[in-house]
Amino acid sequence: MPVSGLRNLVLLLAYALIALAASTTGTTSDASKLPKSVTLSYEVIGSSSVKPLVTVFYDPKSQKHALSSWSPPSLDSLKSTTPEPTSSKLLRILLPNGSSTITTLDTFSEDVHQKIDLWISPTDGSIFSASVSSLSPPPLTSEEERYRKKVERAKAKGKPMPSRPPVPNTKKAREEAAKQAALYEPIKVNLITSSPGPSPSLATRKPPQVDNEGREVVQEEVPEKSLFQKYWWVGLIVVMLTMTGGGGGGDK
């Protein structure tokens, strides 16, 4: 099977799982219920053309999100036409606020999944940074492999696509279906809440003494006491005990 056909099949399986388990994941199909949105654009470095890449609706509090559009760059039109091997072209991922990150054209290859990281501002819930990277898709489970073969046979014979086994209406089954859907989701959105980092502890200094003209008064350094100066009273006690307890005893 061609690579594009295999990818379409994997996408079909993933979207079927997502439709069954959307209620237990951070994704939602109803973008109108999410209060905020952000649109990422891309620009091939060396070109002045900026094109929209993806629009994500999200809720900063519940971390729910939904993709409303996905327009990745065309790999065929941007690949080098020279016979010599060349490195992948660089793309700039742009936010409306002017922030940008760098990725490569290979990030959008049909052989990999895409991961979109969005950093949320703790003050107003806006997106202040974003990046797009690639992920290796996981291998299909034995159950997914059997279903894929059924789909292949149905497509080859021109028959309707076989339906997937229904998910039992239990919390555990829905959670398992949600995990499976997240595993095979071809485009993953990761909402990251920014939190303040550790602050340095600054040493405090006692205010210096100043004279009438505002100049700092230099404090004389007090020399450290000697051992005798510190513990002279111990010797005094020993001498007194010796004098008071040294009398002779009476006649036997």
Image (cartoon, rainbow, N blue to C red):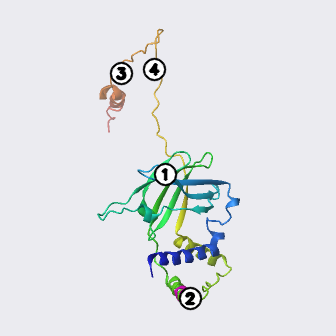
Asked if the stretch drawn in magenta spans residue 213, the answer is no
Question: In the image, residue 148 lies at what x, y percent?
Answer: 52, 84
Q: Earlier in the sequence, mark 1 or mark 2?
A: 1
Tell me which label, 1 or 3, sits earlier in the chain.
1
Instruction: Please state if 148 lies on the left or on the right of 221 as rendered.
Output: right
Residue at the image point whose x is 48% and y is 22% from the top: 207
Tell me the element at label 4: loop
Question: In the rendered view, would you say 149 is above or below 20?
Answer: below
Q: CA distance from mark 4 to mark 3?
A: 17 Å
**Residue carrying label 4:** 208
Of label 2 and label 3, which has the lower sequence position? Answer: 2
Foreground: 202 or 209? 202
Looking at the rendered structure, the kind of residue marked 1 is Ser
Q: CA distance from mark 1 to mark 2?
A: 43 Å
Q: How many other residues sit within 10 Å of disc 3, few (<14), some (14-19) or many (≥20)?
A: few
| Residue indicated by mark 1 | 49
Q: Which residues are magenta?
A: 150-155
- The kind of residue tagged 3 is Val
Q: CA distance from mark 2 to mark 3?
A: 95 Å
**In terms of secondary structure, where does tag 3 sit?**
loop
Position of residue 162 measured from the top left corner of the image (x, y, whole percent): 60, 86
